[in-house]
Amino acid sequence: MSQSRLALKRAVSLAKFLLNVAAAGATIATLLGFAGSLWWVFELFEHPRPQYCLILIAAVVVGGISRQAWSFAWCLPLLLNLVLIVPLFFSPAQGSDLQPANLIPGSTLRLLLVNLDHHNQETSPAIQYIESQNVDLVLLQEVTSRSLSTLQSNLSRYRVATSLPRENSTGVAMLVPTTPSQSVEIVATQIIELPPNSGAPLIETTLRWDSTEVVILGLSIARPQNRGSSAFQQVEFDAAAEWSLRQQRQEKREVVVIGDFNTTPWSGRYEKFLQDSNLRNSLRGFGLQPTWHAALPSPLMVAIDHCLHSSSIRTINRATGANIGSDHLPLLVELQRGF
């Protein structure tokens, strides 16, 4: 055997070995992701499940081509991850709360979530993107005094309705069209904190959408960077769920919650929030739609920006936007009333 062929064979063997090592790591991480209640660090392993799938699929395929029967053991952790991910690609079954056939003819409500990234000094791409969209509300997160001033000076199709800029990641603002839709009327806006005195302002907007009163919350959840912030993240989710139930049951309003949740749609906390808040996931039927980190290739990104809504509202369109220089991609959601 020639030296070149021998070197190639060794390189292939090394690549297979490293792939199996990666698959073993993905398997361990898959299992640790289910043990988040034991230690906050394990919760972080919940989020890269699509990436685990890519590694495990590659290991199964290469193992099959190489006729390594034992490599099909990677199918078990692969299935564990797919069970959580695959439902996002399918609309809910006929007769469920989200049955798309039950739409009420009429106008739609278009929402745009834009995270400006308070570290980003160049807001021109964000301004150009916002100006190119035709929406009823723009929710802005990580708004600084500088970025707000630039927006106010350069936007022509939208104006600032309410804002509270901060020099950290908690600054917020809301934009409305200079020529608003006749079917959407802003009734009231206020800045709240959930839980009270949390230090993170949230914009609550009440609007009349045709004949329906809807309250929209721009939610921003803390990033779990240590044990304390991880525990506080759960406190924030619980407070937001309580707010949602109060709006639906006491105020008799439809609810939309949109923002940076800093968690993925297959995480335990996300699923618990869906149940506790009595809201529905707008991502169902639209796939993964990752939004963070925008500098990475799409297969390496995860979905942490979300939109949830009452069961009587349907998502008829949902998409991520262009890279605007932030670490998040924009999120565009189009909603329609149902029954």
Image (tube, rainbow, N blue to C red):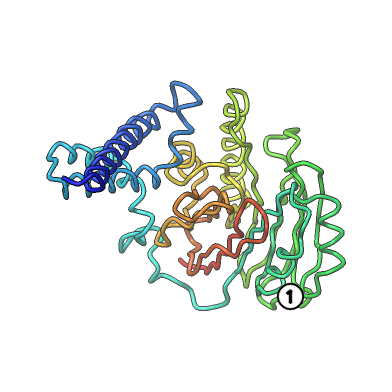
State which quarter of the image contains the N terminus.
Answer: top left
Towards the viewer: 278 or 155? 155
How many numbered discs? 1
Circle 1 SS class: loop
**Horizontally, is 62 left or right of 310 in the view?**
left
- In x, y percent, where is residue 331? 58, 60
- In x, y percent, where is residue 14? 29, 38
Residue at 57% from the left image edge and 35% from the top image edge: 238
Within 10 Å of disc 1 (Cα), the crowding (few <14, some 14-19, many 20+) is some
- In x, y percent, where is residue 190? 77, 51
**Horizontally, is 21 left or right of 155 in the view?**
left
Where 109 falls versus 63 (above or below)?
below
State which quarter of the image contains the C terminus.
Answer: bottom left
Residue at 46% from the left image edge and 40% from the top image edge: 47
Towards the viewer: 108 or 284? 284
Towards the viewer: 11 or 99? 11
Towards the viewer: 310 or 119? 119
Where 18 falls versus 306 (above or below)?
above
Q: Amino acid at mark 1?
A: Pro
Q: Residue furthest front?
A: 2
- In x, y percent, where is residue 326? 67, 54
Q: Which quarter of the figure has residue 28?
A: top left
Where 245 falls versus 159 (above or below)?
above
**Horizontally, is 274 left or right of 128 in the view?**
left
Residue at 50% from the left image edge and 50% from the top image edge: 301
Residue located beneath label 1 in the image = 180
